[in-house]
Amino acid sequence: MTRNKPWILFDIGGVLELVEDGVWQEDLKERWADRAGMSRAEYDTAIERADLPRIDLVQGRAQEYWDGFARALGFTPAQRDEALAEMWDAYCGAENRELIDYARTLRARAGVAILSNSADGAREEEERRYGFSAVFDPICYSHEIGANKPDPEAYTAALAAMGAEPADVFFVDDRRQQIDGAARLGIRGIVHRDNRTTIAAVEDFLTAAIGS
């Protein structure tokens, strides 16, 4: 009996990158509100009224987004560029070198891929910093596929890119709702909390998939 190729599918933020999702975003909003001389409520209202494009779901509108962001807050071009640099530094965090190196070792036994909620520009920025394309293929970003996890369309796009069936895939994400979204399509996975536990879970999956 021919076995299908197993795949290990990784999230980025909070998994391959050491960041606290949900924390850095709030920290930046507070910082930018203060820089604009606004309360946080005033900041939120200004950004909402700016009607900025959803750069987590579309490509090619990042310049429009950041220009609109700057106008909404009264930022100069230099302040806009500073905010953009701050965003990417916080967004990318630090590389989880141990887990990335482990993923590299898997390529003899499995496909290794990425599915990440993202912002337009993430592919270029993360490639410059961490060179993900040398390890992972395919790399599926929400702003390129037009869907965020846990929407089913995000997972089906990744499955199509991998050429895989749900049962052949093991998904690693740091958020329970993303793992639950994958499970609804028949994709098994683990909520990432630490490298040791995640690596053990991946090894268990591969042992079952490939056979001991």
Image (cartoon, helix red, strand yellow):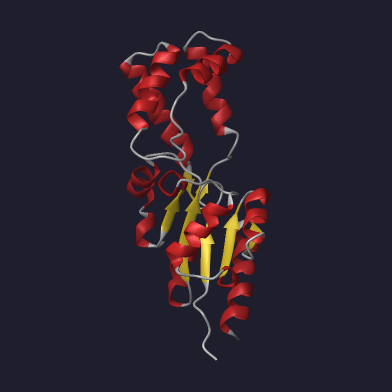
Left or right, 193 with respect to 105, comes to right
Left or right, 211 with respect to 85, comes to right
Left or right, 26 with respect to 5, comes to right
Residue in view at x 57 percent, y 11 percent: 42
Toward the viewer: 89 or 160?
A: 160
Toward the viewer: 40 or 100?
A: 40
Query: In the figure, 110 relative to 137: above or below?
Result: below
Residue in view at x 33 percent, y 37 percent: 60
Question: Where on the picture, by quarter, is residue 200?
Answer: bottom right
Question: Where on the picture, by quarter, is residue 192?
Answer: bottom right
Toward the viewer: 66 or 133?
A: 66
Query: In the figure, 151 relative to 40: above or below?
Result: below
Which image quarter is the C terminus in?
Answer: bottom right
Q: Is residue 86 visible?
A: yes
Residue in view at x 52 percent, y 26 percent: 28
- Horizontal and vertical percent position of residue 13: 52, 46
Query: In the figure, 212 relative to 81: above or below?
Result: below
Q: Is residue 193 visible?
A: no
- Horizontal and vertical percent position of residue 197: 65, 62
